[in-house]
Amino acid sequence: MSTPSRTPSLLASLLARVQGLAASVHGRHDRSSTLVAVQRAAGMKADLEAVLAALVTDARDAGATWQEVGDVMSISRQAAYQRFGQVIDPRTGRPLEKDVTSGSVERATAVFDLLSTGRPDEVHALFDDEMKKAMDPTQLGDVWSHVLGSVGAFESSGTPTARRSGDFTVVDVPLHFEAGDMVGRVSCHPDGRLAGLFLLDPAASS
């Protein structure tokens, strides 16, 4: 029995981000709004990459060869395989790990960019099913508002750090506020969905 395609849910997430971008640029071209638009567009890179990977998986499941995938992407068969393929470890029967930390770092940084610009619904669209059941967009926005009430306005984020924890990539993002610092911790599935989101005191994050 084949695994259900992730493409529809990933496309829905990407569509929400595109609609948010379109709304932000409609009729406004001042410095602030154009910078917000740049920020939103940059945050869509991880979503687009996840959609592309899911579509390649769909094509492979339908019988397409790596040569055919490479041809439609104007890259070599080897490049297509290296980017999207999985090698099974014969000792364990599990896929060998790839370096997925860079995409997870981009996703984690985008999460706090979205929260800081009042878009918890777009963050919620990135949650896995368990996270979506545990918290709705309004509750997520309330959590962020509570943080702002404790440490003041959000000012900037620092350099993220990432590590693997089982099947997940855990990313810590330093968050600097008007009256104090916190650490945003995001746990990502290999496909980019969020499995965990925490706002921690720096002393508790180590």
Image (tube, rainbow, N blue to C red):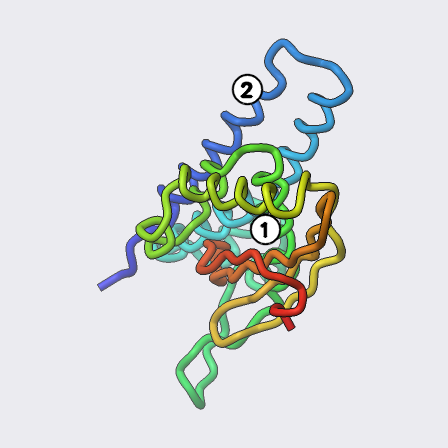
Quadrant hosting residue 149 = top right
Between the C-alphas of marks 1 and 2, the distance is 21 Å
Residue 107 falls left or right of residue 190: right
Q: Closer to the N terminus: mark 1 or mark 2?
A: 2
> Is label 1 in a helix, a strand or a loop?
helix
Quadrant (top left/top right/bottom left/bottom right) for the C terminus: bottom right
Q: What is the x, y in percent for residue 72?
A: 54, 44
Q: Residue at x 48, y 39 (%)?
A: 141
Can residue 44 be seen from the camera position used here?
no
| Amino acid carrying mark 2 in the image | Ala
Q: Residue at x 50, y 68 (%)?
A: 168
Judge whether 44 appears above or below 62 on screen: above
Res 94 label: none
**Residue on which the image places disc 1:** 107
> Is label 2 in a helix, a strand or a loop?
helix
Q: Residue furthest bottom?
A: 91
Crowding around mark 2 (Cα neighbors within 10 Å: few <14, some 14 to 19, many 20+) is few
Q: Residue at x 29, y 54 (%)?
A: 4
Q: What is the x, y in percent for residue 12?
A: 40, 37
Residue 45 falls left or right of residue 191: right
Quadrant (top left/top right/bottom left/bottom right) for the N terminus: bottom left
| Amino acid carrying mark 1 in the image | Arg
Crowding around mark 1 (Cα neighbors within 10 Å: few <14, some 14 to 19, many 20+) is many
Q: What is the x, y in percent for residue 116?
A: 62, 38
Closer to the camera, 94 or 198? 198
Closer to the camera, 74 or 102? 102
Judge whether 105 appears above or below 94 on screen: above
**Residue on which the image places disc 2:** 23
